[in-house]
Image (cartoon, grey):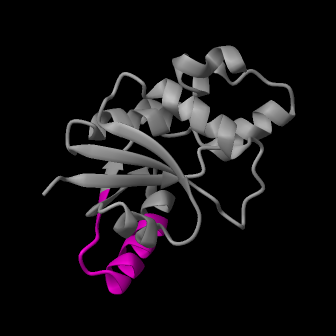
Amino acid sequence: MKNKAVFPGSFDPITTGHENIVRRAAVLFDEIIVAIGSNSSKNNMFSIELREKWLKEVFKDLPNVTIKAYSGLTMDFARENEARFLLRGVRNGGDFEYERTIAQMTKYMDKDLETVILFTDPEHAAINSTVVREILKNNGDVKQFVPEAIRTDF
């Protein structure tokens, strides 16, 4: 059985922190599905199509990473794609508490789905998509916060 993980997120936009987690996890799993979720509580700045394009560009050198969009519960998406693991990235204590709650609820609902948490490397710990969007809305330069492969888009 393949060790397949789903790395869910909005990736609006993808940051160097997201990239850091996927690249480090790529050696741990046979396959990683970077799953662009449709979150009803978020107002997205970028279309799903653009986010998917960016993700494909950023991870084109990793043959075991695929990109898919989805809606609904992440655990249902994982099941549909025969993934046994959810991959999550954590930057700080607040992230950890949130991810722990989600992992425990997921385990309650699907005892066979394991959550694997990787801590982002320290140089990426302050970066998040919400702040990147705010900088963009105010005409700031975000190139240092997004993966090199897509910097020309900003």
Q: Position of residue 114 (x, y in %)?
A: 26, 67
Q: Nearer the viewer, residue 82 or 40?
A: 82
Which residue is farthest front?
80
Q: Residue at x 44, y 65 (%)?
A: 77
> Is any atom of residue 88 visible in this view?
no
Q: Position of residue 19 (x, y in %)?
A: 45, 33
Please tell me in which quadrant of the rendered image residue 48 appears. top right
Q: Residue at x 17, y 53 (%)?
A: 2
Read off the magenta span.
98-116
Q: Quadrant of the C terminus?
A: top right
Establish if 49 lies above or below 71.
above
81 part of magenta stretch: no
Which residue is farthest top?
152
Q: Main secondary structure of the magenta part?
A: helix
Establish if 119 lies above or below 71.
above
> Is any atom of residue 44 visible in this view?
yes
